[in-house]
Image: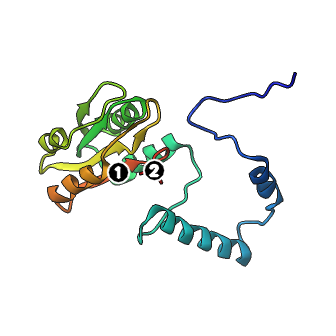
Amino acid sequence: MLLKNRLFTPGPTPLLPAAQNAMAAFTSHHRPADFKALYTRVLADMKGFIGTSNDVLVIASSGTGVMEGSVSNLTSRGDRVLVLTAGKFGERWRDLAKAYGCTVDVLEKPYGETFSLDEVRIKLTPETRAVYVQATESSTGARHDVKGIAKLVRANGDDTLLIVDAITGLGTT
């Protein structure tokens, strides 16, 4: 009997043989014009997929690496941030913000639960520099109301950023 190994983690994702073959056939170097054209097309396609007219960044890193880069580049020591945590990766936002010296306000729910917009509104202050949240919490499958949270953050002022880890939630509705 042939047994297949299965990896039950958030990533890496198993690929269909057709996708594996397509990746194996791609041998372009990253400097020539054909790669630049491909990369430009991929970024444009990503804008359509995400539904944005803003710039899209593709970062070669783990999800945690991108989270850390977000905290270290978008906030400074002493900045007040709000972290919404209801699972493992929300906890990671909290830990990273603390490690980088932010003043961290935490709105915490039990694993698998989500936040009401009233709870978020109460925790936001005029001094809040950034709000960190997961689109979906891959440790439980909980999906947070990112659109509603975004409206609250916009209403909080132009200086407040919303940073969303969408590694498992991008493209879900």
Q: Residue at x 78, y 53 (%)?
A: 18
Q: Residue at x 25, y 49 (%)?
A: 149
Q: Are marks 1 and 2 in contact (CB under 8 Å)?
A: no
Residue 138 coordinates in the image, percent (x, y) = 47, 35
Residue 114 coordinates in the image, percent (x, y) = 29, 35
Residue 161 in the figure: left or right of residue 29: left
Quadrant position of the N terminus in the picture:
top right
Q: Amino acid at mark 1?
A: Ile
Residue 130 in the figure: left or right of residue 39: left
Residue where numbered disc 1 is placed: 163
Classify mark 2: residues with Cα within 10 Å, few (<14), some (14-19) or many (20+). Answer: few
On screen, 40 above or below 74?
below
Residue 49 in the figure: left or right of residue 39: left
Q: CA distance from mark 1 to mark 2?
A: 17 Å
Residue, far right: 1
Q: Secondary structure at mark 1?
A: strand
Q: Quadrant of residue 31?
A: bottom right
Residue 172 circle label: 2
Could you say which is closer to the camera, residue 46 or residue 142? 142
